[in-house]
Image: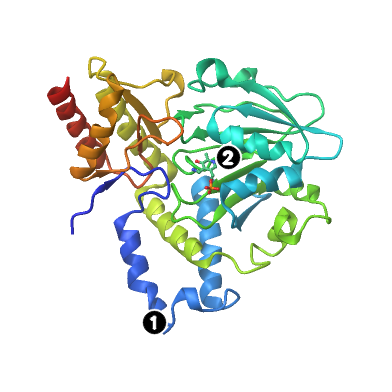
């Protein structure tokens, strides 16, 4: 079966061997006679999958001792609210870097919980750049500093992270988690929806330094409390068992590929191939992002003649290159090159782009 090349931003490409493995195990999970999605989440069959998914995240991301790994529903959107509900201490404020569309949403939700300081705002560059990390300093009385490691819509990505000292740094890594090695010990909390690099939608991974669990007030609703999820090993209530099972299967594949370093090497090569095609097109294509912060995950570009963008996206789809339309809020084109994308897939895109430029230039 020949499948289209999948550049969707999320939900997004999942390695086909993962899909096949899930399909093969779906009706009769490994000889147990029942599907994993129809048995108790407190039985031994699911328990093994759940704990192995946690163990693989710990191993592949190098999560140190003293951090808990939680699986929560509600997407990264719930974390925009839940994280400040837990971490923002009474009488203190929260620092945010406003790097684009997703940071903006995180800030809007935090403002419903307490006082927010915007440490840096990318409006001047139309959110096509990021601050020098060394200039990002927590303000007086700050409970945490929040960054968005990769802006999925804008296509900007932090290459190095701020040093926030004793104030915990919190990162929304939804669109670049496990795409490169990251020193988790520099963060107080990391959250990411699974539907880009980790599997299907439905589960959000939260990695939290254990001392921060003490900030969860007993007044919070049970599901909204990190401490409740941590105490129950993310089994306080029924977890999203299918997305967790699928995520575990994706993680096994990442391990086989050689882990975060190997994946990062591939990601750098894939992104370089696409940026090369954009930059060498004599202005037919143009990437608006500051070269110092160009994302390796979500690559955005415009056509010199913006009126041809719709035709570009349509003809690409007809050629089996799916999901290249930019986000509805910004237009243009975007290719998401998550971990599952191959260099060959990107080369099919760049060959199409060269050809389209020749025909329409
Ligand atoms: N943060 C980032 C960086 C995202 O890319 C997204 C989704 N594309 C979200 C947050 C929101 O995630 P969800 O739809 O899972 O709530």
x and y, in percent, of residue 29 in the image: 41, 77
x and y, in percent, of residue 32 in the image: 43, 83
Q: Which mark is residue 116?
A: none
Which corner quadrant of the image does residue 357 belong to?
A: top left
Residue drawn where x is 40% and y is 20% of the image: 288
Q: Which mark is residue 172?
A: 2
Q: Quadrant of the N terminus?
A: bottom left
Of 302 and 168, nearer the camera is: 302
* Secondary structure of residue under mark 2: strand
Q: In the displayed structure, does residue 174 sit left or right of residue 343?
A: right
Q: In the image, is residue 332 above or below residue 184?
A: above
Q: How many marks?
A: 2
Of 264 and 137, nearer the camera is: 137
Of 261 and 342, nearer the camera is: 342
Of label 1 and label 2, which has the lower sequence position? 1
Q: Residues within 10 Å of mark 1 (few under 14, many from 20)?
A: few
* Residue 63 in view here: no
x and y, in percent, of residue 57 in the image: 52, 52
Question: Disc 2, ligand 1: is the CB inside 8 Å?
Answer: yes
x and y, in percent, of residue 213 in the image: 75, 50
Q: In the displayed structure, does residue 2 sit left or right of residue 86?
A: left
How far apart are labels 1 and 2 at the CA level?
Answer: 39 Å
Q: Residue furthest right?
A: 91
* Secondary structure of residue under mark 1: helix
| Residue that label 1 marks | 31
């Amino acid at each position: 079966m020949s499948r289209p090349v999948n550049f969707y931003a999320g939900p997004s490409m999942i390695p086909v061997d993962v899909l096949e493995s899930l399909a093969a195990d779906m009706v009769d999970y490994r000889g147990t006679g029942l599907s994993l999605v129809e048995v108790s989440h407190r039985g031994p069959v699911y328990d093994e999958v759940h704990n192995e998914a946690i163990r693989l995240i710990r191993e592949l991301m190098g999560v140190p001792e003293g951090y808990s790994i939680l699986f929560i529903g509600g997407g990264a959107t719930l974390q925009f609210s839940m994280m400040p509900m837990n971490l923002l201490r009474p009488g203190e404020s929260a620092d945010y870097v406003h790097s684009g569309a997703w940071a903006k949403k995180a800030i809007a939700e935090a403002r419903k919980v307490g006082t927010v300081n915007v440490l840096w705002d990318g409006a001047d560059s139309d959110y096509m750049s990021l601050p020098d990390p060394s200039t990002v300093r927590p303000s007086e009385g700050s409970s945490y500093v929040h960054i968005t490691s990769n802006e999925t819509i804008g296509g900007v990505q932090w290459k190095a992270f701020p040093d926030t000292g004793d104030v915990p740094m919190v990162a929304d890594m939804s669109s670049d988690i496990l795409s490169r090695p990251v020193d988790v010990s520099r963060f107080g909390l990391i959250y990411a929806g699974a539907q880009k690099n980790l599997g299907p939608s439905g589960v959000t991974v939260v990695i939290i330094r254990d001392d921060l669990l003490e900030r969860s007030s007993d007044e919070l609703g049970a599901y909204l409390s990190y401490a409740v999820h941590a105490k129950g090993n993310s089994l306080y209530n029924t977890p999203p068992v299918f997305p967790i099972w699928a995520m575990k299967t994706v993680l096994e594949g990442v391990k086989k590929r050689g882990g975060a370093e190997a994946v990062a090497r591939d990601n750098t090569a894939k992104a370089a191939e696409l940026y090369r095609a954009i930059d060498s097109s004599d202005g037919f294509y143009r990437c608006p992002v500051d070269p110092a912060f160009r994302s390796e995950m979500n690559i955005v570009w415009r056509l010199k003649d913006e009126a041809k963008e719709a035709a570009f996206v349509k003809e690409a789809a007809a050629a089996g290159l799916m999901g290249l339309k930019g986000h509805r809020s910004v237009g243009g084109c975007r290719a998401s090159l998550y971990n599952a994308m191959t260099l060959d897939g990107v080369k099919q895109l760049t060959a199409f782009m060269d050809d389209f430029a020749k025909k329409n230039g």
